[in-house]
Image (cartoon, rainbow, N blue to C red):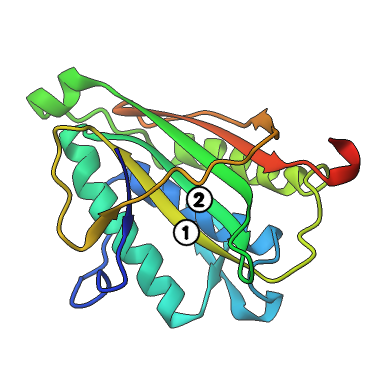
């Protein structure tokens, strides 16, 4: 089942990151929306995380949205109920979907069931994040230009038997017809294996 945070979902939620896995989701979101020009460059600032300089959006409403969504996902990851997270980039005017950044999650059920910690060291995380950042930057060279103002949304695929909070609403998958697909770097927290891929709308001239 695919769900998205409803309009009232931001009220009164304390944002925090519960695991290495969800922190890395957050640090993927910011460079994607920066590299794809969803927000102006001057709305981002650099901060140091995992020994790397990373870009963080300063628009408070959007930061609150990302923090709220990732906070919920962090809790759900601990139960093993999350199947994938998708960052959707679409036209502000027409709502047409241009890109879907997919993060597919495979959970080690033994770890979540028994509560055994297998978290990676910061050095290992840094190496994998560096590889992810390089790939996201490289994607800009082959992805079609976004020629109009765009927005983004985060979709979460959860198990059918899991009941999301009432601030979340069931959503369509926002698929792209005749999409091109490119697989990106995988990430493994030793609890969750995260495979990444981007699907994007081909320019009409390429179809």
Residue 206 in the figure: left or right of residue 131: right
Q: Position of residue 26 (x, y in %)?
A: 44, 55
Q: Residues within 10 Å of mark 2 (few under 14, many from 20)?
A: many
Question: Left or right: 181 with respect to 27?
Answer: right
Residue under the point 50% across and 46% down: 174
Q: Is residue 17 visible?
A: no
Cα–Cα span, label 1 and label 2: 6 Å
As helix, strand or loop, the secondary structure at mark 1 comes to strand
Q: Quadrant of residue 129?
A: top right
Q: Quadrant of the N terminus?
A: top left
Say the numbered circle drawn on residue 82: none
For numbered disc 2, what is the local secondary structure?
Answer: strand
Question: 146 left or right of 31?
Answer: right
Report the quarter where the C terminus lies.
top right
The residue at which mark 1 appears reads as: 153
Mark closest to the chain's N terminus, 1 or 2:
2
Whether the residues at callouts 1 and 2 have beta carbons within 8 Å, the answer is yes
State the residue at coordinates (62%, 56%).
96
Give the class, few, some or many, for how many residues have Cα within 10 Å of label 1's Cα (few <14, many ≥20): some
Front one among 155 and 23: 155
Visible residue check, residue 8: yes
Disc 2 target residue: 87
Above or below: residue 66 compared with residue 141: below
Q: Residue furthest left?
A: 114
- In x, y percent, where is residue 188? 42, 28
| Position of 51 relative to 196 (above/below) | below
Which percent across, then down, holds residue 66?
Answer: 40, 64
Classify residue 27 as left or right of residue 1: right
110 or 198, which is in the foreground?
198
Q: Residue at x 63, y 65 (%)?
A: 94
């Amino acid at each position: 089942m695919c769900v998205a945070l409803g309009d009232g979902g931001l009220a009164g939620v304390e944002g925090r990151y519960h695991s290495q896995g969800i922190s890395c989701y957050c640090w993927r979101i910011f460079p994607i929306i920066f590299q794809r020009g969803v927000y102006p460059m001057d709305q981002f600032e650099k901060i140091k995380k995992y020994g790397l300089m990373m870009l963080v959006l300063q628009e408070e409403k959007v930061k609150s949205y990302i923090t709220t969504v990732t906070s919920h996902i962090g809790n759900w990851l601990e139960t093993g109920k999350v199947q994938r997270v998708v960052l959707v980039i679409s036209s502000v005017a027409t709502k047409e979907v241009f890109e879907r950044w997919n993060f597919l999650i495979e959970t080690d059920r033994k770890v979540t069931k028994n509560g055994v910690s297998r978290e990676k060291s910061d050095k290992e995380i840094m190496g994998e994040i560096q590889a992810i950042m390089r790939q996201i930057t490289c994607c800009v060279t082959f992805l079609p230009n976004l020629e109009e103002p765009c927005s983004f949304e985060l979709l979460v695929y959860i198990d059918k038997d899991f009941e999301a909070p009432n601030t979340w609403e069931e959503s369509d998958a926002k698929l792209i017809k005749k999409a091109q697909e490119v697989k990106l770097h995988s990430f493994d927290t030793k609890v969750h294996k995260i495979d990444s891929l981007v699907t994007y709308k081909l320019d009409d001239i390429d179809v």
